[in-house]
Image (cartoon, helix red, strand yellow):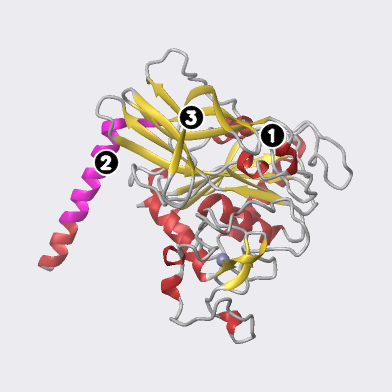
Amino acid sequence: MKKSAVVLFLFFIYCSVVFAQHYNDFFNDKACRVDFHFCGNAQQTNIFLDKVKQEPFWGGRRGHLSNNLNLGDYRFRVLDSISHQQIYLDGFSSLYHEWQTSPEALTTNKSFEQTIQFPFPRKAVTLIIEKRTDLDHWSELFRYKLSPTDKLIQHINPKVVPVKIISKNAAPDKAIDIAVIAEGYTAKEQRKFYRDAQRLAENLLTHEPFTKYKSRINIYAVAATSEESGISLSTDSVWKNTAVGSHFYTFYEPRYLTTLNTFKVRDLAALVPYDAIYVLANTTTYGGGGIYNFYALTAAGNKLSTQVTVHEFGHSFAGLADEYFYEKQDALDGMYDIKKEPWEPNITSLVQFDRKWKNKIPEGTPIPTPPTEENKTKIGIFEGGGYLTKGMYRPMFDCRMRTNQAPEFCPVCQQAVERMILFLTE
Ligand SMILES: [Zn+2]
């Protein structure tokens, strides 16, 4: 071994020890789950605590504990109670935040379930939840002192549900662990669910950069049983009794398929170590939804499911924005303010474009980049994205985050996904 290689090797060992010491100094191998409610209306956001649970597995990262990738409408910080040192940081988004832009939020107060999870602390900590005000600033919404010895922290093992390993390539602390949860499958349809979960996994792994990092991805199928087969408010407009109660017509948008029962989803995910949750819905109706560090949920049996499952995972796993936009009114109109730079890596309002893909395009690239045949395969600044036709820009003419015809993620989206994979596994 050359001297430089020896130094590099020793440095790597040193880094591993430092990370390991840091994690083990503050956390054990279980997960701390905090359930709360986002309550309010278009103008107000309040947080009310529901419960704290200890769950059997921590499947998340063990390195970079007090950094994050600056994604999400919210973030939470965990501080050591004595030293006030920040020992964990993570970003997330919510269905509540989207609802706040809907007409209903102008006249109604509502609450939405939300869960955050971090490694279970060994000593007392302070949990702070903050809302993003712009790309670099936050305002505090909630502060809570959490003692790991609190008797009322629920140590309940999740209800036993059959779990099948679809692919296991690395130890959970070095892998992206994806919990795929059955929704709308009866006991008799368990094998159908496993086949659908297998198809979702194979399809995801054909998309870059998931293909490149296949050896770091574990996928588990959690076969939750539904009383009735299918999904509520699909083509027949009937409500069904299903494992996590998902339905179409979220915010009255026919194809927007979500569940409000976040706590139920987390109870099922807790059966395995997980970084990401995928709820697979037993329906042929087109639809889905995906929210950053929350969950992805899609129809398993539609002819476009192959594309949609990957698109929604782009949202939930890497915080990618929708690159599409419509001339007509959309349920999510009002999600973005073009006077601010959005936090999502794949759209820009040009307010802080240097924080986005500016370094990937030649100087003098026209704004907006004309969608000519020649430009369609190049990275540029194409107008339209984030549900807006004007004032918001995307990196490529087409991308998995824009249409179902696009064969793959654009290079900017691929890089964002890769960055997340490396962040969680190294
Ligand atoms: Zn893209």
Per the model, the C-alpha gap separating discs 2 and 3 is 22 Å
* Residue corresponding to mark 1: 244
Tag 2: residue type? Ala
Magenta region: 10-30
Q: Quadrant location of residue 330?
A: bottom right
* Residue corresponding to mark 3: 33
Circle 3: is it few (<14), some (14-19), or many (20+) Cα within 10 Å?
A: many
Q: Is residue 277 left or right of residue 5?
A: right
**Residue 153, percent across and down?**
46, 18
Circle 2: is it few (<14), some (14-19), or many (20+) Cα within 10 Å?
A: few
Q: Ligand 1 is found in which quarter of the picture?
A: bottom right
* Quadrant housing the N terminus: bottom left
* Residue corresponding to mark 2: 20
Per the model, the C-alpha gap separating discs 1 and 2 is 36 Å
- Whether residue 420 is in magenta: the answer is no
Q: What element carries label 2?
A: helix
**Residue 134, percent across and down?**
48, 50
Tag 1: residue type? Val
